Image (spheres, helix red, strand yellow):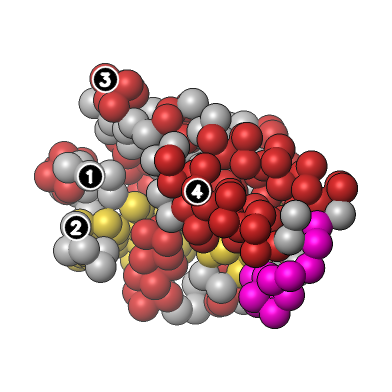
Amino acid sequence: MTIQTALAQGSRLLEEAGVAAPRLTAEVLLCHALGCERPYLYAHPERELGHNPWLHFGRYLHERLAGKPTQYITGRQEFYGREFRVTPDVLIPRPETEHVVEVALRLRPAPRRLLDIGTGSGALAVTLALETGAEAWATDISPAAVAVAAENARRLGARVGFMVSDVAGALAAGAVDLIVSNPPYVPLAQRDGLQREVRDWEPPVALFAGESGLDLYARIVADAPRVLKPGGWLIMELGFGTLGAVQRLLAGFADILVEPDLAGIPRVIAARR
């Protein structure tokens, strides 16, 4: 079994199962099995796979066909040009969340101290700590998620303090001048309509926020004036269809700004204390 043949067979299996981007997925899984980068596959198409790489590739294909996200199979996901470790204990970072970083860098390019609420893999906290040099803190209600985030910070050389905490309860009043968050925002009623990769594999605590999907937004907004210094910014990712409700929650803030994603969908909301 050569690399070329393995890719052809893997791509066909994934395509027949309706997996998105079957060829790319097969390439990523085969690279993971071989411990190589994608250019190697095209430079050595006639290389024969050894027994162990072939077994690993077959297992990875089986897992992906069963719905397990590719990122949980490989254990990694790129975010803002850096590679983050991910496990089923954390939400897989999405490219759309990079807009939170971009808005934060534009509105508060040099914060003294920042907080990431619901950090998950640590993508926002680690990225902003490295991009701004600020003192960074991050909270998550999941101890397992905090462990993943702390490992990402250590591996990437970011100085971030992590706390197992519900929202911002562990922080003192006036502690930060920037809060960022990609909170859970999926209503419980929409659970069955999610892709199986999301519904069956990503942590429910990072996805669902009550019947309306607004529970975490309401709690973050309610506590933000206590934690933020005067003039500090609260920046959050928006779920689809949540803009109006979140704007109403932020009625007591100043300078409310909305940033769309590349598809023109409102993706980030920012408000100044």
The residue that mark 4 highlights is 12
Kind of element beneath mark 4: helix
Q: Are marks 4 and 2 in contact (CB under 8 Å)?
A: no
Residue segment shown in magenta: 38-49
Marks 3, 4: nearer the viewer: 4
In the figure, is residue 187 to the left or right of 151?
A: left
Pointer 2: residues within 10 angstroms few (<14), some, or many (20+)?
Answer: some
> Does 48 appear in magenta?
yes
Q: Earlier in the sequence, mark 4 or mark 2?
A: 4
Q: Amino acid at mark 2?
A: Ile
The residue that mark 1 highlights is 240
Which residue is rendered at x = 69% and y = 71% of the image? 45
In terms of image quadrants, where is residue 19?
Answer: top left
Q: Amino acid at mark 3?
A: Ala
The residue that mark 3 highlights is 189
Residue 201 visible at all: no
Q: Earlier in the sequence, mark 3 or mark 4?
A: 4
Marks 1 and 2, how far apart at CA: 8 Å
Q: Earlier in the sequence, mark 1 or mark 2?
A: 1
